[in-house]
Amino acid sequence: MWAAMVSLALAAQVAVPFEILTTHLPEPRKGEAYKVQLQASGGQAPYTWKLLQGSLPEGLRMDASGVIAGRAESSHGFALLVEVRDAEHPPLVETRLLPTAAEAPIALRWAEAPSAGASGENSGGQVSGAVQADYNGDDPAKLTVFAVAVNQDGKAFSLRYDQRQVHHGETTGALAFDVFLPPGHYRVQVDGVAEVRSGVVYRARLAQAELDVQ
């Protein structure tokens, strides 16, 4: 049930070009200056940020512009659930869990860059490629990788779905796709979702420039 809900949710999100780009935060060092600007894209600027859950170490604070700054009084790591809203009415809203880490909890990369091939006799063509997900989170998680192609009308076509249990340092290897699609201009997008436990979910996104399928 959870997997089906994730699939539907991801498919619904791909047409909305609004997302949090920051995946993790640098670890603080006691007494040293600390400053991070949270990043988002899409929607209408300016963005307004809010801390929903978690707490910053003494000496650090986060403002509505998404800047976390100060001098931490400890070197302990932390995790924050943050929200960003754009300036539209009503606003677009995104949330993300941001842990302190040396690298992103989920790293997505193209094992084979997406490409479009002609079908020959039929109208339309094959969209093929392969994506790989590396899991760097400390705790075991259920990792879902969902690839879609979104056409110029915002309609999403499923390319690949993969779900598995992962531990720190594990990789999915190349997850290949080769799907026939109707004519159109497509943006290939991959979402990675790692569910550690209730309320602790890491996310990552990878997108490819438009492909022309004829």
Image (spheres, helix red, strand yellow):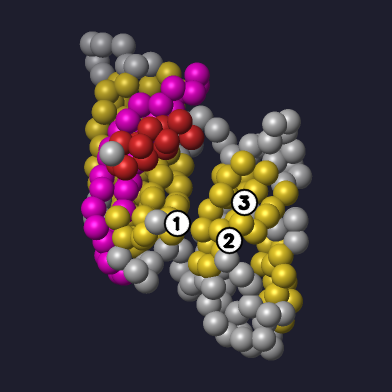
Q: In this picture, which residue range is highlighted in magenta?
A: 143-171
Examine the structure image and report whether residue 153 is included in the region drawn in magenta: yes
Image coordinates for residue 4, horizontal then vertical, percent: 30, 36
Q: Earlier in the sequence, mark 3 or mark 2?
A: 2
> Which residue appears at 57% of the width and 36% of the height?
17
**Label 1: which residue?**
199
Choose top left, top right, bottom left or bottom right for residue 178. Answer: top left
Residue type beneath disc 1: Gly
**Is most of the magenta stretch helix, strand or loop?**
strand
Quarter of the image containing the N terminus? Answer: top left
Quarter of the image containing the C terminus? Answer: top left
Residue type beneath disc 2: Gln
Relative to residue 94, is residue 3 drawn left or right?
left
Q: Secondary structure at mark 3?
A: strand
Mark 3–mark 2 Cα distance, whole angstroms, equals 10 Å
Relative to residue 153, is residue 213 drawn left or right?
left
**Label 3: which residue?**
83
